[in-house]
Amino acid sequence: MNAATRYQSLDVLRGLTVALMIIVNTPGSWSYVYTPLLHAPWHGFTPTDWVFPSFLFVVGNALAFTLPRYEGMGSSAVLAKIGKRTVTIVALGLLLCLLPKLGGPLSDVRLPGVLQRIGLCFGIAALVLHYLSGRGALAVSVVALLGHWLVMALFGDYSLDGNAGRAVDLWVFGSSHLYKGEGIPFDPEGLLGTLPATVNVIGGYFAGRYLRENGATSRTLGVLAAAGVVLSALALLWAPLLPINKKLWTGSYVLFSTGTALLALAALAWVIEVRGAQRWTYFFEVFGKNTLFIYMLSQVAVVALDKTGTYAPLAAALGPIGSPKAASLAFALLFMLACWLVGYWLDKRRIYIKV
């Protein structure tokens, strides 16, 4: 199978994760949100908890198609390409954290964040996969998941205030530079959780490589689906010992989110590549073609609406739609569609903004 073969299902999965990220991040009111559109309060798993790790999974899918291009490069060139992209994504994440603080004190700017984690996970996974090959990456994944579990068990517990990840972040960043949305300084995108989160990227790489090497056949997709079932089952078996927890990014959460992402990819590829049902895919492909730019746009737009005092009035204008939760969801959907229109405009002009 040609390494350059493009699979619409991968673009659709990437676009789907971006669309869902925007929807769950921008409700009309955080006081009125349907439960599936909220993260689990602590232990547990909701559809919203699936979104971020699935984005990391599709980052790994993309690596399966880009890493073969690095094989003829020298080590310094590979390091430069991976390093440049890692630093760029992390820098964009820091910029998003800085924007809401412009004009005010910078002493409490949040330092960890979503893009910071994406950038670090990409960089670590790309280096591991390029220099250690497939078997080495599998070994690193096992060590990462078990090592994270060991650190969590030996140096803390699985509670909000007593987990080892919080202790690491307090020591490295200080309490003023962490997320405060949990009621105390604790960052769900902290340093320690980046280690197991990298395994989501590596899992996506292996899925993408298997698809690239074997083609989107019924047999290939059956193998991916079976792997998804096995990983999900292992996660559930592990959960009594290590709870499925997105905010701690536990190993059981990694296995469950990767397993369900594999099932989603297999289902999409069967519908799109095997059955040829492609008329509906363009909407999500638009998001998938300018992924990071559209996500950045959505975050910058939220800050702009907040700074100008227009976010709440716009959301309130949808009140007559029905219940407060319905109006809140309607705002999120309209906001997502507005971002899509920008992506559509870019795609029609063949403008693709990469980092």
Image (spheres, helix red, strand yellow):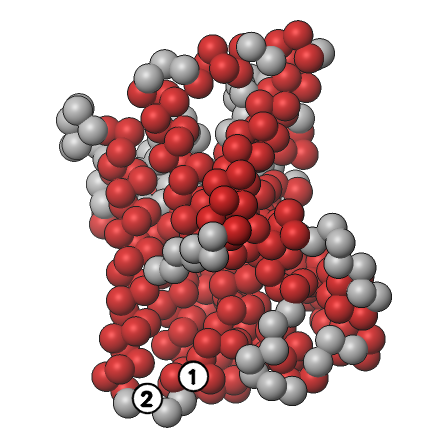
Q: Measure the C-alpha gap from mark 2 to mark 1.
A: 8 Å
Residue 88 seen in the figure: yes
Q: Residue at x 55, y 25 (%)?
A: 27
Q: Is residue 136 left or right of residue 116?
A: right
Labelled pair 2, 1 in contact (Cβ < 8 Å)? yes
State the residue in front, 267 or 135.
Answer: 267
For disc 1, the neighbor class at 10 Å (few under 14, some 14 to 19, many from 20) is few
In the image, residue 28 above or below residue 281? above
For disc 2, the neighbor class at 10 Å (few under 14, some 14 to 19, many from 20) is few
- Which residue in the structure is indicated by mark 1? 69
- Which residue in the structure is indicated by mark 2? 73
Horizontal and vertical percent position of residue 335: 53, 30
Q: Which secondary structure lies at badge 2?
A: loop
Horizontal and vertical percent position of residue 334: 58, 28
Task: Determine the image quadrant of residue 211.
Answer: bottom right
> Which corner quadrant holds the C terminus?
bottom left
Amino acid tagged 1: Arg
Q: Residue at x 84, y 66 (%)?
A: 275
Q: Residue at x 69, y 53 (%)?
A: 281
Q: Residue at x 30, y 54 (%)?
A: 90
Horizontal and vertical percent position of residue 50: 61, 48
In the image, residue 82 above or below residue 241? below
State the residue in front, 54 or 306.
Answer: 306
State the residue in front, 319 or 239.
Answer: 319
Task: Determine the image quadrant of residue 253.
Answer: bottom right
